[in-house]
Amino acid sequence: MAARRRSKRKPTTARRTRRSFPLLQLLVVVIVAAAGYLAYLDIIVREQFEGKRWALPARVFARPLELYAGRALAPEQLTQELDRLGYHSVRDPQRPGEYSRNGTRFQISTRGFTFWDGADPPQQLAVEFSGDWITALGDRVQHKDIDLARLDPLQIASIYPSKQEDRQLVQLAQVPPLLIQTLMAVEDRTFYEHHGISPKSLLRATVANVRAGGVVQGGSTLTQQLVKNFFLSNERTVQRKLNEAGMALLLEVHYSKDEILEAYLNEVYLGQDGSRAVHGVGLASYFYFERPLDQLEPEQFALLVGMIKGPSYYDPRRHPERAKLRRDLVLDTLVEQGILTAEQGTQAKARPLGALQRPSLAVNAHPAFLDMVRRQLRSDYREEDLTSEGLRIFTTLDPLAQHAAEDALTKRLARIERDRGLKADTLQGALVATAIDSGEVLALVGDRNPRMAGFNRVLDAARPIGSLVKPAVYLTALMQPERYTLASQLEDTPLRMKAGDGRIWTPENYDRQYRGQVLLFDALVHSYNVPTVRLGLDIGPERVVDTLRKLGVQGELKAYPALMLGAADLTLMDVTRLYQTLAAGGFRSPLRAIRAVLAVDDTPLQSYPLKVEQVLDADQVFLVNATLQAVATEGTAKALGARFGVDAGIAGKTGTTNDKRDSWFAGFTGNQLAVTWVGRDDNKSMGLSGASGAVPIWSDYMAELGVQPLTLPSSERIEWVWIDRGNGLRADTNCADRVQLPFIVGSTPQAWSSCARGELSKPIEWLKGLIR
């Protein structure tokens, strides 16, 4: 029996050996597979963490507001600029980003900022106004005058990668110690002790949360949180948790605690601004408090750290009560840990949340302008550079001008529709404004809804320009002073001519009236069509095209007689180039929207200096501009003279196309040019002339900004003479219908009108003429 039992046991042992061998093999396979998978995770960790960790969007800035004694600027405009920049209005400004106003006196504590031409430190400014002018600028601490100061520029847009993440990178040394202490106390007290995962922290967090009656501590380590945010998705699966633990251990093997902490501070998700995700404490500090990290108070650190658990749930703007409870729990934790005293904690809890209750910062508040910026950048940068390298792009946009442009366009179009009984939202419009002395684009609106990022009517809508072409026709004639002056008489009688296709073309004046003979000056002031066509035919359409090219027009032009009346489809930008050169006295400069580009480390990459080329005789342009000033006082845009006064010296030209499909006005003051257009996208008639559609928008825009009077620069070659409007001869006070016109010396009419000084004086003048 014993032998039988032994014989039975032997097979049992063999079977067990045979069974254990596959288990051992399986264990080896599992270990090898796990090692291989860890190696795979290790490659992912090192490749992503050692490379470019984040795609940093390009930041686009408006122009900085420059302050100096003698600058035209209203106190309300300075207040608007400071408010847009997020400056806090306080009684006694001490910290950067604060200001006070007492009537016409401002005290401003500016923020430091690194510009394309160097870094400006924070300053304590005192600014005095008289009316709409700065009369004094000084340092209120050192009690001395300052020649020039500039505010930090407003960020107007960012160019994002596809993930729509935004962050402002900070180095660990730039982070206040109190913020790091707060983060450790709430999220990971043993951060500098564990190796990526901490069972003790998980247990301690559970106990602390039960005692506090709420979640005041997290169980995952900072390293685990970083791995989850940086490498993994948000799915709740066992595999993801295993990956999280493995990658946390690997991260701690390869990188120092400080490197991991710095990465966490830049990666942590802290809110949503429309479609952009706000990541990192650096950007969150500005997003919620409009201050850099080193200017935050303990309660603000507590709020930021408290929001890590749920940025949307604890959003201080949408859920202030919930956010305050969370913040106060964090402050209690800081007191318990001895980071704050009981008194400091009580004081901090008594303070408000401090988050700015302002509208969400748009990713791109001015899409039409940004469209122009991106087009100008394409010649120097790849798209991926713009969305990932953290470039800082300094533009020419003037927030004061842009706001005025948007306001004028949207409100006036709605008013026109209401007053004329038009269906709401049927009219469209666009406006562009530039600085005359530099060609910088100050404002650009491509849609009656300024936030609409669709079709850009400034850059892409080619429309007939109507009478806006006429100054080029008359300038071409005045280039021949031996043949034409402003006193030359033009024939204003019916005209019939055969067009290129064999049809008969009969141009008419706007009012369908004919005046026989008119001065060249009056023909332009009142925009008479027939005299303009006759003049263009006499000097040659080819010469007019050449003048338009010199003025900067880049669109297609055909040397046909109809060109004299604006039969050319040009964009608003082309029209702006044309009038920019006129306004600059014959000096052409490219229209530019960018001043400079800096790398993420503030290294200058590209500058866009002013380029100026004289393309036309300044005195001949002067004659045209003087005539355009009369357009705004007695011609088709005389409503401007009535609103702003003759002394404003506004110069400009209206344009109206066939069947009133397009309404145009291009006008300039002492410092800027603005071009406005009104029409319909379906190209139907809207019943508006240049005077009734585009001019009111231009007028509203300038009224909000304030008009700087235009005094045309005159040379010694220009002389002014009284002329009889009836015949183009010299006149005096005895002539009832006379006008004073400029002439280039040597081209002035010598003969006197019969109304001048009486008949007896003419022989004397004739003799004086012989003596001369």
Image: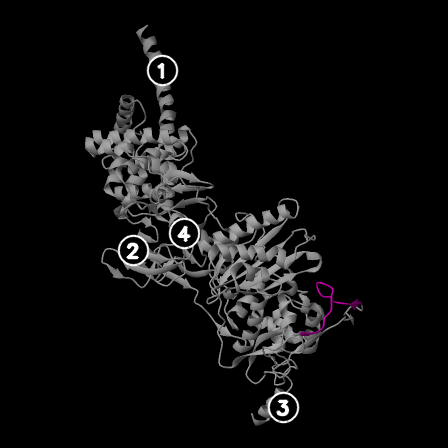
Q: At x 49% / y 76%, what residue is drawn? A: 714
Q: Where does the magenta region start and end?
A: 503-518
Give how far across and how far down residue 10 sits, in percent. Answer: 34, 15
Residue with the most extreme top position: 1
Name the secondary structure under disc 1.
Answer: helix
Between the residue at mark 4 and the residue at mark 1, the CA separation in whole angstroms equals 98 Å
Residue at mark 2: 125
* Image coords of residue 655 (percent x, y): 63, 62
In the depicted view, which residue is nearer to us: 765 or 689? Answer: 765
**Which dot, 4 or 3, sits closer to the camera?**
3
Q: Secondary structure at mark 2?
A: strand
Q: In the rendered image of this protein, does residue 194 appear above or below residue 444? A: above
Q: Which residue is mark 4?
A: 76
Nearer to us: label 2 or label 4: 4
Q: Return the residue at label 3.
A: 763
Mark 2 and mark 4: Cα distance apart in space? 17 Å
Q: How far apart are the alpha carbons under marks 4 and 3?
A: 62 Å
Please tell me which of labels 3 and 1 falls first in the chain.
Answer: 1
Marker disc for residue 12: 1
Residue 249 placement: quadrant: top left
For disc 3, the neighbor class at 10 Å (few under 14, some 14 to 19, many from 20) is few
Question: Nearer the viewer's eye, disc 4 or disc 1?
Answer: 4
Say few, some or many: other residues with alpha carbon within 10 Å of mark 4 (under 14 / 14 to 19 / 20 or more): few
Q: Closer to the camera: disc 1 or disc 2?
A: 2
In terms of image quadrants, where is residue 745? Answer: bottom right
Q: How far separated are the C-alphas under marks 3 and 2?
A: 69 Å
- Residue furthest to the bottom in view is 771
The kind of residue on which mark 4 rests is Glu
